[in-house]
Image (cartoon, rainbow, N blue to C red):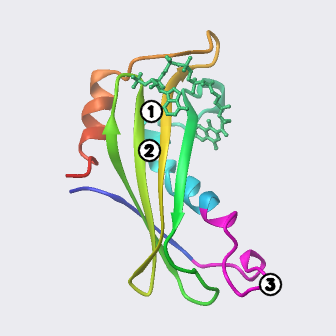
Amino acid sequence: MAQFDLSIQPRFNETDGLGHINNTVIPVWFEAAREPIFAIFNPELDLNNWNLIVAGFTIAFTAPTYYGKPVEVVTRISRIGNSSFEVLQQSFQAGKMTAEAKTTLVHYDYQTEKSVAIPADIRELLGSYLTA
Ligand SMILES: CC(C)(COP(=O)(O)OP(=O)(O)OC[C@H]1O[C@@H](n2cnc3c(N)ncnc32)[C@H](O)[C@@H]1OP(=O)(O)O)[C@@H](O)C(=O)NCCC(=O)NCCSC(=O)c1cc(O)c2ccccc2c1O
């Protein structure tokens, strides 16, 4: 099963007064880890031809993430619909899962402001990252 991997070194300024990486930070890491997926839809990452929009996301923080140890973010596809698909992401620190998020992205035409069916070639590529 193929996946995208991103290693993050938590920064001091991402740590809150309780010593945790703040809850607002991890969705930002997850967004960075989705970049290879944006590139499937838009290989040049050309903002003038952007064709994805975030419809929503859920996140569960399953253990605290701390400063000082690297975090591995794993990204896979958990569902492919007509114009939408869901991205499943998990963060791990010292082998322990600390967060899991599901983000729905919609293939979208920013000029007409309408969703667009995912083309067959992109669907096939996304399918290779689909969770079992
Ligand atoms: C998201 C919308 C475009 C959906 O519009 P609408 O409901 O009219 O469209 P459809 O009926 O055609 O549905 C299309 C498709 O989407 C599924 N869906 C719709 N709403 C949701 C939802 N809330 N959650 C999950 N899934 C949803 C629906 O079931 C259909 O699935 P099919 O597979 O069957 O086709 C519209 O609601 C809209 O425009 N919403 C506002 C979006 C928005 O403002 N998002 C936040 C700002 S954008 C953003 O922050 C952002 C940041 C980034 O860094 C990005 C990076 C890379 C890509 C995108 C980024 C980005 O968007």
Task: Check disc 1 and report the residue beneath it.
Answer: 41
Q: Secondary structure at mark 2?
A: helix
Say which amino acid is labelled 1.
Answer: Phe
Q: Is residue 103 above or below residue 105?
A: below
N-terminal of the pair, mark 1 or mark 3, is: 3
* Magenta residue check for 19: yes
State left or right for residue 112 relative to residue 105. right
Q: Nearer the viewer, mark 1 or mark 3?
A: 3
**Cα separation between marks 1 and 2:** 7 Å
Q: Quadrant of residue 113?
A: top right
Magenta span: helix, strand or loop, mainly? loop
Q: Which mark is residue 85?
A: none
Give the class, few, some or many, for how many residues have Cα within 10 Å of label 1's Cα (few <14, many ≥20). Answer: many
- The magenta-colored residue range is 9-26
Q: Is residue 57 above or below residue 107?
A: below
In the displayed image of the protein, which residue is found farthest to the top? 112
Task: Check disc 2 and report the residue beneath it.
Answer: 37
**Cα separation between marks 1 and 3:** 39 Å
Q: Nearer the viewer, mark 3 or mark 2?
A: 3
- Which x, y percent locates residue 104? 48, 39
- Which x, y percent locates residue 13? 78, 77
State left or right for residue 71 relative to residue 26. left
- Which x, y percent locates residue 84? 42, 29
Give the class, few, some or many, for how many residues have Cα within 10 Å of label 3's Cα (few <14, many ≥20). Answer: few
Task: Check disc 3 and report the residue beneath it.
Answer: 17
